[in-house]
Amino acid sequence: MNSESAIRHPPSAVPTLRIAPSKGWVPLKLGELWEYRELLYFLVWRDVKVRYKQTALGASWAIIQPFLTMVVFSIFFGHLAKVPSDGIPYPIFSFAALVPWTFFANGLSQSSNSLVGSGMLISKVYFPRLIIPLASVFSGIVDFAIAFLVMLAMMLYYGLVPTLNVIWLPLFLLLALVTSLGVGLWLSALNVEYRDVRYVVPFITQFWLLATPIAYPSSLLHQPWRSLYGLNPMVGVVEGFRWALLRSNSAPGPIIAISASAAIVILITGAFYFRRMEKTFADIV
Amino acid sequence: MSEIAITVEGLGKRYRIGANQQAYKTLKEKLTQTATAPFRAAQHLLTRNGNGNSQSAIRNSKSGAFWALKDVSFEVKRGDVLGIIGRNGAGKSTLLKILSRITEPTEGYADIHGRVASLLEVGTGFQPELTGRENILLNGSILGMKHAEIRRRFDEIVAFAEVEQFIDTPVKHYSSGMYVRLAFAVAAHLDPEILLVDEVLAVGDIDFQKKCVGSMQSVADSGRTVLLVSHNLALVESLCNRALLLDEGRVSSNGPTANVISDYLSKYQLNDSEDLSHHPRKNPKSSAWFSSIQMLNRDGEPASDFRAGDEFTVKLGITVESPILQPWIGIRFRTPADQLICHIANREAGYQLPAISSASKIECQISSLNLLPGRYFVDLLLADMLNRHYDKLSGAAYFDVREADVLQSGMPMNQAYGLVFFPSKWKLIETSAKLV
């Protein structure tokens, strides 16, 4: 709550909270979000724990999903269709993209459904609602880490040694997170009012998968289309991962700059839209 | 330090009727909705730039709206324990939800001075898969406790809940009693300056309810401000120093608890019988239960206030799903301090009730209410001659006995004389001489 102001004022002053109708666009209140960071931590912790406790295969799901997709892609695109892979073995070429993609796609679908799924919580307790989609996206990091270990094992198998570029990797992961969260905020807020969103999400992910250079290299596109392509933030993520881990291409600086700008725009607009719709959540959910 | 904990001024909340119906549309509607959703969203954004309320205005024209709260204004002083009472749908829960910031008011404002915690439900966010220990951490954090604070009070919480042995067992294996105890234990260890509570006490067995009331009492005694929404007038009366009566979204009475409760009673209870179907029960409802209670005075009028020594009639409505062959119905009077005064039952009165197999009304007439002035609670028991219990209600109703010159001596009696009175005849039968 308002303990910040309680600290700043002399002890005799009591924090005062005014509850009044809000109109139009409202501030994001990032300070309050920060005060609730422990709740965010616990919700992430709960998501991870419950997911691994409830499913028979537990943590191995984090590996199975991208790994089997990689196998299918390698057979159909790499082996049969002979899709080029910038001189890298096709399996590791596609897996390097599938690991961040899986993180993105799962974060997107879980955050889109997160508000509707937390209806009980929303209608009974106050906390900054932004925490809910945030927690859904963050909880995917554990899955990502497990899948990333498989990635390292595969690199070992193919005798590929990462270069120093690998220090940029967290930044690319952050870009995937920002994109996933940004779209997740838009969709989760829309989902409360228009329950159709849950049917739309699988379509969106499917189209997005094809619009991202996962099964094919982005070198198939030529300028200026390639820069335009960067408006899809996942292009920057995938290019970044391939560059940092496999050195399959030259430094994708311009594309990443475009992707990062696009992702930030999605995130900021998503956050404001979410905050604007927030006051209706408890009444509709 | 300011004397006022909460100021509410002109608070109103409008709900759109049918806002939920969107989830239940046909596939065709869903498709058209999908196709038009972006346009509608865009339209909302465009139209709302000029006018903050146009979205609601659109809905209004389509499906209407209603005000769950309207023009609600009141103040709560620091240390007050305010009971919020009213019938179902009077706006009690909406008021609490606004003060808890779960939903926004449509108009007016509320100022809250101090750290606030709200408890609208016991066990919000409990996860069946997680252990008791994990749920304490999770639930505490959801209710707004800091991690360090939960750790510090962890042992107290576990001890309060009496679940020491099962603390590392997933709560899906808990009995419902254990589950509720654990959930309440976490909530009971919240430490706010202002606590907002919604009828969460109506859970668990009687012993645990008493423990909960005890912990509420200690919160109230510690000088913190409490707002309690409840249907249970007896609880409000024993815990709250002030009360607020809501009627169709408006404040109908506000003041000392006793006054507000009598306003409530005169407003409703005189006209019709008290609905018992949703009264908190120790055990879930079985195949038969008490659905209503009505008390009548010597003139046969519904009342909640009687003269000592008058005729007193109780009418009970019973809902029956499968027949009861030999019903045994018990009515107990007890004091607010839980002291049993008497148990009146048809079997003991020598009246064999016929089998009842559908909704029935039963009347019990007491020719002389031999209770001294004060407040009395009524408990009800529905069983059969084989002592199978169907329904048991604690505090189903209460009534007041007014001071009266019951023995026609010109010497009114009150509770200084005890709880009951016996008409008595006196005469002098022996005396040694020299009377004068």
Image (tube, coloured by chain):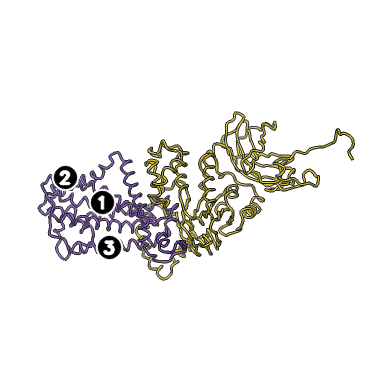
Q: Which chain is yellow?
A: B
Q: CA distance from mark 3 to mark 2?
A: 33 Å
Query: Where is mark 3, residue-wise?
Result: A264
- Can I make out residue B36 in this image? no
| Pointers 1 and 2 within a single chain | yes
Q: Position of residue B158 (x, y in %)?
A: 43, 41
In the rendered view, does A150 fall on the left or right side of B247? left
Report the residue that reaches farthest toward the top: B386
Q: Position of residue B316 (x, y in %)?
A: 64, 41
| Pointers 3 and 2 within a single chain | yes
Q: Is residue B275 above or below residue B60?
A: above
Q: CA distance from mark 1 to mark 3?
A: 18 Å
Q: Quadrant of the C terminus of chain B?
A: top right
In the rendered view, does B119 fall on the left or right side of B245? left
Query: Where is mark 2, residue-wise?
Result: A153
Residue at horizontal 14%, vertical 58%?
A220
Chain letter of the residue beneath label 2 in the structure image: A
| Pointers 1 and 3 within a single chain | yes
Choose the circle earlier in sequence order: 1 or 2.
Answer: 1
Chain letter of the residue beneath label 1 in the structure image: A
- Give the quarter of the image for residue A217: bottom left
Give the amino acid type for the residue marked by disc 1 in the picture. Answer: Phe
Mark 1, secondary structure of its residue: helix
Mark 2, secondary structure of its residue: helix
CB-based contact (under 8 Å), mark 1 and mark 3 = no
In the rendered view, does B354 fall on the left or right side of A266? right
Q: Position of residue B15 (x, y in %)?
A: 49, 59
Choose the circle earlier in sequence order: 1 or 3.
Answer: 1
Mark 3, secondary structure of its residue: helix
Give the amino acid type for the residue marked by disc 3 in the picture. Answer: Ile
Query: Where is mark 1, residue-wise?
Result: A103
